[in-house]
Amino acid sequence: MYNMYNTSTEELHMPSTCNKSLVLVPRNGGPCFPLPIFILLAVLMVLLVFITVLGNALVILAFVVDKNLRHRSNYFFLNLAVSDFAVGAFCIPMYIPYALTGKWEFGKGPCKLWLLLDHLMCTASSFNIALISYDRYLSVTKAVFYRILQRMTSKTVIMMGAIWVFAFLLYGPAIIIWEYVAGCSIVPDDECYPEFSYNWYFSLCASVFEFFTPLISIAYFNFHIFQSIRKRLRSPTHQLSENSKSKSQSWGSSSSGNNFSTSVGYMYSVTLDSSVASQVHSKTAKEAHFRGFRKRTWSKMQRDKKAAKSLAIIVYIFAICWAPYSLLTIISAACRKQCISEPLFEFTSWLLWFNSSVNPFLYPLCHVKFRRAFRKIFCLKKPVIFESHQPDSSKDPSVDTP
């Protein structure tokens, strides 16, 4: 996320507000890349920016094109796409000249703005993935409560906004006021990194909240998701019969009586006589209701299983991309950056940003609704053709399934 390493060990020209004797940091001589390597790195960096911006822009555009995506869980994906889009549109492009030349040419003000937005967007991305896991956890393990939450749009908006507030509070105040509290600045004019980069305690605490806490939360939620789905898949028939029995009891139905209730959009009651024909009809109706309920429940379990697998992919990629950077940040702050090589730390920084570029491509691969939305974006003539044949296809319900 920022360049903290240099090539020589001379003392820096400190700002006038800082006593030179307070800290010795190495002078940045700038990376010396051969021209072919320089061009190759520049092309790869620009390519990463293009992929990150395009992928996340498509996810955002999908919400504009397809109204079917606008429900609770997908709004959290939108929140994630916004933070990842900002990483590709602002954070990485401003860092590319700094990474290639080793010198920050934009000044102190833009440096703080870049650091603030970079930490804000990356932290918000981390928190959003944890929130998506929590939302999936509620959907699978507490379905009734989750259906209630889906109607509470205000609560969804509050949770999305809280992500940005917490992400800002984690790093924002430290980036803005650290040098004023410390009484001096350790960052030279031609470099850009946080004032607290040498503070091991702050780096440890920030990494705990930014990476380790979300990772533990994600692991906990996904573990319970898989446990819940596994239990239902092991004994689906028993569960379905129990659910059907409980529903019949809640509707006031009794197998030994003459009355039973069913729900098809609303509640109604049918009184049965004691004739054999009525008993056969009652049994047939109950069996049909049970088969329909079993089909719906099994379909929901399959959707939950597929969603859990897709979420697990996002979690694994998140851990792979974030763990190296978070661990090296703590270690480098403890040893004052003398025990970690510059290329290794640079690689972990770009690996963290790579997470923002790969996230949007997980959605169309794992979610049918996103695939439909992307088809609408790239195949604009398809809805027109479909619409023109709609009167004929309406006769056949199977045509509606893409």
Image (spheres, grey):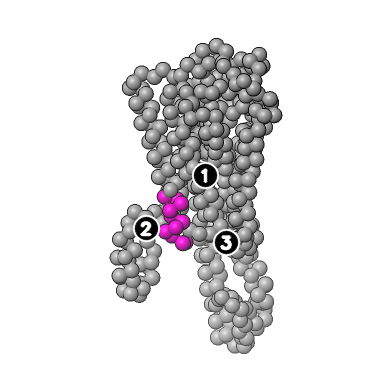
In percent of width and height, residue 317 lies at 50, 38
Please say whether residue 270 is visible from this viewpoint: yes
Residue 290 horizontal/vertical position (percent): 56, 70
| Residue 230 shown left or right of residue 67 in the figure | right
Quarter of the image where one finds residue 223: top right
At 66% across and 17% down in the image, what residue appears?
Answer: 19
In-front residue for pair 164/102: 102
Q: Quadrant of the C terminus?
A: bottom left
Q: Give residue 237's mark.
A: 3
10 Å crowding of disc 1: few (<14), some (14-19), many (20+): many
Label 3 or label 2, whichever comes before in sequence order: 3
Count of numbered circles on the image: 3
Disc 1 marks a residue whose amino acid type is: Ser
Magenta region = 58-68
- Considering depth in this image, is 95 or 393 the residue closer to the camera? 95
Q: Which residue is mark 1?
A: 83
Callout 2 secondary element:
helix
Q: Earlier in the sequence, mark 2 or mark 1?
A: 1
Labels 3, 2: front one: 2
Marker disc for residue 376: 2
The answer to which of 104 and 320 lies nearer the viewer is: 104
> SS class of the residue under badge 3?
helix
Closest to the observer, 297 or 8: 8
Q: Secondary structure at mark 1?
A: helix
Is the residue marked by circle 3 packed among few (<14), some (14-19), or many (20+) residues within 10 Å?
A: few
Instruction: Name the amino acid, label 2.
Output: Lys
Quarter where residue 121 is shown: top right
Majority secondary structure of the magenta segment? helix
**Is residue 63 within the magenta segment?**
yes
Residue 345, x across and y down, in percent: 52, 24
